Each structure stands twice: as structure tokens, then as C-alpha cells.
Amino acid sequence: MAKIKIIESPREVWWATTYQGRLEINGKEVEYRFHENSNECELFVLEEGLGWTDSPVDLNTYDILYDLLVELAIDDLDGVGDEFEFDLTE
């Protein structure tokens, strides 16, 4: 039998999550993967001919999507069929 003594309580020091979803932005359907961890956020969109990319042809839609995913909680996007307006931050 091992004798255990806790010297310091465990704490989260790093985490990572990747979400995948589809949205319609200004009439254009966009499939995305949004990866966030304790250091950064990365956005990839599925682009025909390119696969998953962070350099899509339509940068305006990409910028709107990135701001949306950074500003809102991902749980705010789980209402399939919901519609709302979002302003791109300057």
C-alpha cells in the first residue's frame, strides 16, 4: 500500500477544444472548425479544392465568422434554424 500526501491541489494548466459546425453568413453556407486552447484560437473553413484552410478565398466571411466565434459562447450557436444579426468588430 502506498502512503499519499497531497502537497498542492491539481489545477488546469492547459486545455484544447475543437468545434465543427455549419452556418449561413449573408446567404453563404460555411462549414468551419474552430480550435481554441489556453493560448490561442484558430479557425479553419472547408473550401472546395483547398480542404480545411485558414486562408479562404472569401476573407470577409472568414473575418465575420472568426469574430462571431471569438465573441459568442459556442453554446449560443446550438439552436438549429435560429437567425440573428451580428456586427463585425472594427
Image (spheres, helix red, strand yellow):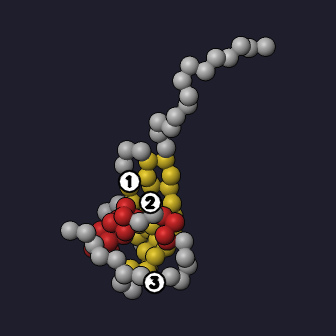
User: Which residue is labeled 3 in the image?
Assistant: 83
- Which residue, as the protein is rendered here, is positioned at the far bottom? 27
- Which one is closest to the eye, mark 3 or mark 2? 3
Q: Mark 3: which amino acid?
A: Glu
Inspect the image, locate mark 1, and give the three-letter code of the amino acid beneath it. Cys
- Determine whether 26 is above or below 74 in the image: below
Q: Are marks 2 and 1 in contact (CB under 8 Å)?
A: yes
Structural distance between the alpha carbons of marks 2 and 1: 7 Å
Q: Is there a contact, CB below 8 Å, between mark 1 and mark 3?
A: no
Q: Which mark is residue 86?
A: none
* Residue 53 figure quarter: bottom left
Kind of residue at disc 2:
Phe
| Place of residue 10 in the rendered image (x, y in percent of width and height, measured from the top left) | 55, 31
Please tell me which residue is depicted at 28% across the width and 72% down the height of the picture.
88
- Near mark 2 (Cα within 10 A), the count class, few <14, some 14-19 or many ≥20, is some
Mark 1 nearby-residue class (10 Å; few <14, some 14–19, many ≥20): some
In the displayed structure, 69 sits above or below 84; it is above
Label 3: which secondary element: loop
Q: Which quarter of the rendering shows the N terminus?
A: top right
Q: Earlier in the sequence, mark 1 or mark 3?
A: 1
Residue nearest the observer in this picture, 21 or 57: 21
Residue located at (46% from left, 76% from top): 23
Circle 2 residue: 34
Is residue 51 visible from the viewing direction of this image?
Answer: no
Between 59 and 71, the residue placed more toward the observer is 71
Secondary element at image label 1: strand
**Which residue is situated farthest in the left direction here?**
90
